Image: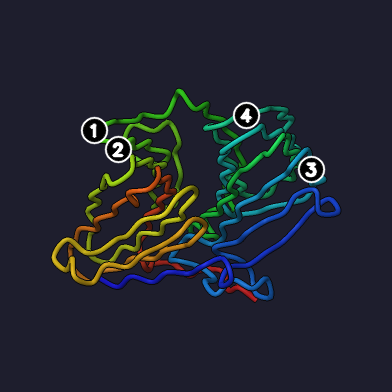
Amino acid sequence: MQILIYPPSMQGTGSFDGGSITEQKPIGFSGEGSVVKRVGPLFYWAWARAEEEGYIPLHPHQGFEIMTYVLQGRAEHGDTLGTRSTVGAGGAQIMQTGSGVSHEERFIGPDMEAFQIWFEPAIRQALLRQPTYAQVEHGEFPAEQAEGCTRKTVIGEGSPVRLVTDALMWDVELEPGRLLRHPLPAGRTLTALAVRGGGSLHAADAPEKAGSFREKDFVLLHSHKDAEAVVTADAGGRLRLLLIEVPSSVDYPLYPKR
């Protein structure tokens, strides 16, 4: 298993509304400073923060499937489909932008945090679909607890989120010193972003090759054979991770980043 760790200095940055919204970008566009430009169909990943309130005016999207996942505070959404909605911590807003839609966003604090994550289906087919919007509240996502680990399925079995793109996503919290075992099939890549706390990770069959990560680090794990990743929270604090698993490559053309 290959393990790559990218600290914030190797991630991109951005801002909106005169700096009212700031962003750390584990996966960004060219020129934004992100070493990682995409992972299979995972096209873009921004971690946005607003101390008080920030606004992004109406702007267009086509083709991509875009999720806003709220960590703290509230996200307001409006679009040219006639949608007006607000979601709080733990909730998600999902746009399948299809043939084209414009939307506006307002992030409301105090200390608002959210991820905006873009997935890329086969674009030619996506552009023929009608755009859609869906919202899912925190309590609608399935979650399981066992041995100091809480694992919430954001995209995957039991989740109400339905994407065309092949992707899975979990919000995981580990008590100090506890571990998570995650099976990783051959040909797939697991991405992990340390939201709070730090820890270590290794392949189950190679514990001597553990890598350590800290809060805000971005991690990629890839295996050419079926494997199991083991994540252990530091003994000194609770760990929260966002995990996204996607195929390392897909059988359709991907949009070229410039």
Q: Position of residue 235 (x, y in %)?
A: 32, 49
Residue at 67% across, 56% down? 23
Neighbour tally class for label 1: few under 14, some 14-19, many 20 plus, Cα within 10 Å? few
The three-letter amino acid code for the residue at tag 3 is: Gly
Disc 3 is placed on an element classified as: strand
Q: Position of residue 174 (x, y in %)?
A: 34, 42
The three-letter amino acid code for the residue at tag 4 is: Val
Tag on residue 54? 3
Q: Position of residue 231 (x, y in %)?
A: 29, 54
Residue under pointer 4: 87
Which badge, 4 or 2, is on the more N-terminal residue? 4
Q: Nearer the viewer, residue 122 or 106?
A: 106
Q: Is residue 64 left or right of residue 225?
A: right
Disc 4 is placed on an element classified as: strand
Which badge, 3 or 1, is on the more N-terminal residue? 3
Residue at 23% across, 33% down? 146
Q: Is residue 15 left or right of residue 122?
A: right
Disc 1 is placed on an element classified as: strand
The three-letter amino acid code for the residue at tag 2 is: Cys
